[in-house]
Amino acid sequence: MLRVWRASGQELAAIRAEEFIHANAVKQHLQELHGFPMCLQQLVHDSKILADDDNMDAGMDLQLVLLTISGHDQEFTDAAIEQLANASRKNQVDAVRCLLEAGIGDYIDCWDYGGKTALMHASEHGHSEVARLLVEAGADKDCWNNEGRTALMYASVSGHLDVARLMMPPRHPHSNVARLLVEAGAEKDGSNLDDKTALKYASVSSHLDVARLLVEAGADTDCWDRSGKTALMHASERGHLEVARLLVEAGAEKDGSSYDGWTALMYASASGHLDVARLLLGAGAAKDAPDGRAWTALRVASRYGHSHVARLLVEAGANKDRRDKGGKTALMQASEHGHSDVARLLVEAGADKDGSSYDGWTALMYASASGHLGVARLLLGAGAAKDPSERWGYTALTLASRSGHFQVARLLVEAGADTDCGDRGGKTALMHASECGHLEVARVLLEAGANKDFEDLAGKTALLRASESGHLDIVSLLLTGRCIPAPSIQAVAPMAPPLWEQAPRNRNKIPPPVLLESDMVAYIERVLRESGERGASQRQTKALVERTLRRWVFSNGWTLELLAPLFSSRRPAR
């Protein structure tokens, strides 16, 4: 049996030697048994100091000597500092007390390798007895770590309390530590590198007990952090109702704004926290306070689709048609982002359906451009105008066609939208769909009777737009009313090798009908290629190609498949 004694004659341990082969294992056992920090332990046998790797034998009597901090090298001191931090983090009260008795007090505010002091560790983990020992030993309550946090901040931010615990008396361990620090005179409004105070950390973490303690101790409820947010803004953004109530009742500024111009109500609205929004409105918060972009709480709620908050704001009298700096209203925001519940609420509340932004866009245009079928149907059903145009002459149908939203396009066509309305460049919805390669939209427009022979101001038709962009499926749809399957397109691609030497030299003459079909394809291919090289006008190119198509394809009965190589790629760049 291996026995360990104090110098006073007190037996500390009687253990089996075979279970503790080296002296280091004995030290670890004594630390677990009595809390003696390993760095302070010195084992002596027959007046010889044992090294950590010395072997243990049965029948040995060991004497334990506890060292003091002073008189040792820096390596020993660093080990003691790290041991104090570990003991504080793990709530090892005896080990902390032993280290303090050994003289660690001169280094009590030193950081460990993680950049925290022992008091910060105890505060972060809610170990109130350890914290009390450290404070009584002179630990600096307002010492900052490398992130600018103090022990009080760690006590404030740690331990997220659930709702049940929020309703309990302040007995949570972190509350005890915070109370200890406040009573000991810790700086209540000290801030870290982000200008966050203990109260802000408590508000962010919904630590009601700590927040109440700090408020009662006189903490500043309205100081800003680096982003310009107050504690009330943080609580509102995260939906911490009881913390927000505490701050409001303590007189926190309800309408103060962050550096972005957002108020607490705007943060609550953006995050969809109905109860917090109701609390703020009931306390008299401004409903229509704008930020730097003239966004209001209603616009924010509409942007993020929080219909319940939007309803609360509307019922509270918020301005439904207020415009931001881009001229957008809440209804336009809801329409652009597809929030049909919010859009319905606003329409039913009398919001202007046909109002336009400063670019001339209406709510229906935003819904159409983004492909939100439900919102578009709602607006049309409410009587929204179908054909107003924005500054470039785009209508809702044009925007849906450009973006490829064929279901919205069909809805607009069925509602009577003008299929042949041109923009400022004379381009119709069919031209846009053809140029962008939106086959289903083109089909919807053609079935609705869109004129495929209209020319824009550049003299181009939908057919030429599709041809230039290489959309063979739309070319075939425009020419024949049907779309060539992809396999047949690939199969006929080798049918028309370039026959430059056989092509007519006069580009303005239609080749005689005696030429072979392959000659005709090569001729059109060459017209497009050389037109790009010599900068020919689009009108000249269009005239040549379309006259050739009409005369050679329709008059002679040749098949569209023959022209596949012509449209299988874009016209060569100039």
Image (cartoon, rainbow, N blue to C red):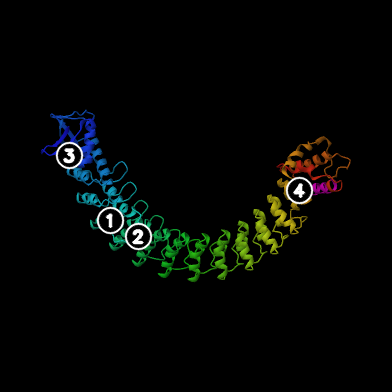
Relative side of 194 to 143, left or right = right
- Residue at image position (71%, 54%) is 442
**Tag shown at residue 42:** none
Foreground residue among 358 and 374: 374
Q: Earlier in the sequence, mark 1 or mark 2?
A: 2
**Residue 373 place in picture, x, y as percent:** 62, 59
**Tag shown at residue 476:** 4
Disc 1 designates what residue?
Answer: 178
Q: Earlier in the sequence, mark 4 or mark 2?
A: 2
**Secondary structure mostly taken by the magenta-highlighted segment of the chain:** helix
Decide if residue 328 is in sight here: no
Foreground residue among 540 and 24: 24
Question: For the residue labelled by badge 3, is the local secondary structure a helix, a strand or a loop?
Answer: loop
Instruction: Verify whether residue 482 appears in magenta.
Output: no
**Residue 451 place in picture, x, y as percent:** 76, 57
Q: What is the C-alpha distance between the residues marked 2 and 3?
A: 46 Å
Disc 2 designates what residue?
Answer: 164
**Residue 146 place in picture, x, y as percent:** 33, 46
Q: What is the C-alpha distance between the residues marked 4 and 2?
A: 69 Å
Q: Earlier in the sequence, mark 4 or mark 1?
A: 1
Of the two numbered discs 4 and 2 in the rendering, the one whose residue sits closer to the viewer:
2
Disc 3 designates what residue?
Answer: 68
Q: What is the C-alpha distance between the residues marked 1 and 3?
A: 31 Å
Contact between labelled residues 2 and 1, with CB atoms less than 8 Å apart: no
Badge 2 crowding class, 10 Å Cα cut-off, few under 14, some 14 to 19, many 20 or more, is: few
Q: Earlier in the sequence, mark 4 or mark 3?
A: 3
